[in-house]
């Protein structure tokens, strides 16, 4: 993944995606894991999470 995220952004993205998975969202990768956080982390590493970060700089 070529974008650089802070550790806070990464945690927020993975947490939000894990919640989506728990609520029934389709899993975007092939995995043997059943833990939503593990799945979200794998999706993040592959760059397939459909979440964007919008930074507001002043």
Image: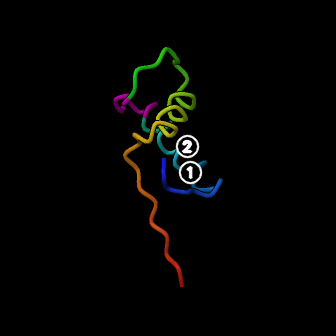
Task: Name the spot of residue 34 as percent of width and height, x first.
Answer: 51, 18
| Residue found at the far front of this picture | 2
Among the 4 quarters of the image, the one containing residue 28: top left
Task: Name the spot of residue 19 as percent of width and height, x first.
Answer: 49, 38
Local packing at callout 2 (Cα closer than 10 Å; few below 14, some 14-19, many 20+) is some
State the quadrant of the C terminus: bottom right
> Is residue 44 depicted above or below 39 in this figure?
below
Mark 2, secondary structure of its residue: helix
Q: Quick one: 33 or 22, which is closer to the camera?
A: 33
Residue, disc 2: 15
- Structural distance between the alpha carbons of marks 2 and 1: 5 Å
Residue, disc 1: 12
Q: Residue 23 carries which label?
A: none
Q: Quick one: 49 or 37, which is closer to the camera?
A: 49
Whether residue 11 sits left or right of residue 24 in the image: it is right
Query: Is 23 included in the stretch rendered in magenta?
Result: yes
Whether residue 33 sits left or right of residue 6 in the image: it is left
Q: Which residue is drawn at the image coordinates 57% and 28% (left, top)? A: 38
| Residue found at the far bottom of this picture | 58
> Is residue 52 depicted above or below 46 in this figure?
below
Whether residue 8 sits left or right of residue 45 in the image: it is right
Q: Give the range drawn in magenta.
A: 21-28
Query: Is 34 included in the stretch rendered in magenta?
Result: no
| Residue found at the far top of this picture | 32
Question: Badges 2 and 1: C-beta atoms under 8 Å apart?
Answer: yes
Mark 1, secondary structure of its residue: helix
Q: Which residue is drawn at the image coordinates 49% and 45% (left, top)? A: 16
Q: Count numbered badges in the picture.
A: 2
Task: Name the spot of residue 48 as percent of width and height, x first.
Answer: 39, 40
């Amino acid at each position: 993944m070529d974008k650089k995220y802070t550790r806070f952004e990464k945690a927020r993205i993975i947490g939000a995606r894990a919640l989506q998975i728990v609520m029934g969202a389709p899993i975007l990768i092939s995995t043997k894991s059943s833990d939503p956080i593990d799945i979200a982390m794998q999706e993040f590493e592959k760059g397939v999470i459909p979440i964007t970060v919008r930074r507001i700089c002043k």
